[in-house]
Image (cartoon, rainbow, N blue to C red):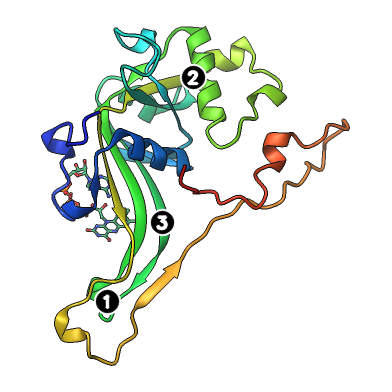
């Protein structure tokens, strides 16, 4: 992706100084995010649903090119084959948004209150991944987005895979916005009596707890125990 907007509709106008179009930085935010909000216009109106997601290099089956990332990347989302939003999304444009809130920005006047954040907006037409083996590979990417626990769990059955719809959205028409730093107040307020500053927001994974109905003596997988104490939105 070029470091300029990919299209007119992905050009950030409001707060353009916060816009980021660099593919690596966009993927870094996606890597640090946990939830994507996927929006689509359906027959009974627009709907936006929160979903898990994963990002991978575009593979040959979803493009004309190589599976080495040379064709860019794609965002994967999944759900039940009956999911109306996902079914609608494979034929029309979708919008996938990932948001990380890094803190509250308290200004001298509420008009200038804000949040520090990293957000990505991706627009494009989704493609359903029909081949069962490729769907399985895509499910692994989504599953392992937060922690690589796929290999330490029971593999999904053919029936599980059949019941799951996976959509790929190309990471070509994407923009990010990043806000960091202090409030931006008006000159006339700078000598006033009102407090201004930041309240950072951190999100950390807690200690894993074993399910009460666990019957075997399996140890906590390394990838799970490694989460404890980790910044859930660490930039990487
Ligand atoms: C946590 C959070 C809270 C926010 N709260 C508010 C709020 O209360 N009110 C408000 O007006 N705005 C808020 N924003 C900013 C909001 O997301 C929009 O950027 C802003 O409203 C401008 O919208 P627009 O359609 O006028 O932008 P335009 O600049 O016209 O948008 C053009 C294109 O820029 C891209 N774009 C726009 N916004 C973003 C974004 N945030 N991240 C990545 N790409 C983007 C999209 O591709 C969009 O189609 C918030 C953002 C975050 C992350």
Question: What mark, if any, has residue 138 been given in the picture?
Answer: 2
Residue at left 15%, top 54%?
14
From this viewpoint, is residue 45 visible?
Answer: no
Relative vertical location of residue 139 with respect to residue 114 in this rendering, above or below: above
Residue at far left of view: 8
Q: Secondary structure at mark 2?
A: helix
Question: What mark, if any, has residue 110 been given in the picture?
Answer: 1
* Residues under numbered marks 3 and 1 in contact, where contact means CB atoms less than 8 Å apart: no
Question: Within 10 angstroms of label 3, few (less than 14), some, or many (20 or more) residues?
Answer: some
In this rendering, the label closer to the viewer, 3 or 1: 3
* Residue behind mark 3: 101
Residue 68 image position (x, y, % from top left): 40, 14
Q: Quadrant of residue 21?
A: top left
Relative vertical location of residue 23 with respect to residue 73 in this rendering, above or below: below
Residue at left 38%, top 48%?
99
Left or right: where 101 falls relative to 120: right
N-term mark: 3 or 2: 3
Left or right: where 68 falls relative to 39: right
Residue 36 image position (x, y, % from top left): 41, 39
Residue at left 22%, top 90%?
191
Mark 1 CB in 8 Å range of ligand 1?
Answer: no
Mark 3 CB in 8 Å range of ligand 1?
Answer: yes
């Amino acid at each position: 992706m070029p470091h300029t907007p990919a299209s007119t509709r992905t050009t950030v106008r409001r707060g353009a100084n916060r816009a980021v179009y660099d593919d690596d930085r966009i993927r870094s935010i996606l890597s640090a995010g946990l939830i994507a909000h996927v929006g689509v216009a359906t027959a009974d109106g627009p709907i936006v649903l929160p979903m898990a997601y994963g990002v991978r290099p575009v593979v040959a089956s979803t493009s004309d090119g190589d599976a080495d990332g040379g064709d860019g990347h794609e965002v994967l989302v999944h759900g039940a084959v009956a999911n109306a939003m996902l079914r609608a999304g494979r034929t029309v444009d979708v919008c996938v948004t990932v948001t990380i809130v890094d803190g509250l920005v308290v200004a001298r006047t509420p008009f200038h209150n804000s949040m520090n954040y990293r957000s990505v907006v991706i627009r494009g037409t989704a493609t359903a991944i029909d081949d069962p083996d490729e769907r399985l590979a895509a499910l692994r990417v989504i599953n392992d987005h937060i922690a690589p626990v796929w290999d330490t769990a029971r593999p999904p059955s053919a029936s599980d895979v059949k019941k799951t719809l996976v959509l790929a959205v190309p990471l070509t028409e994407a923009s990010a916005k990043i806000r960091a730093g202090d409030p931006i107040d008006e000159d006339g307020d700078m000598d006033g009596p009102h407090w201004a500053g930041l309240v950072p927001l951190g999100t950390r994974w807690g200690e894993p707890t074993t399910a009460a109905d666990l019957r075997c003596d399996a140890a906590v997988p390394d990838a799970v125990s490694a989460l404890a104490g980790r910044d859930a939105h660490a930039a990487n």
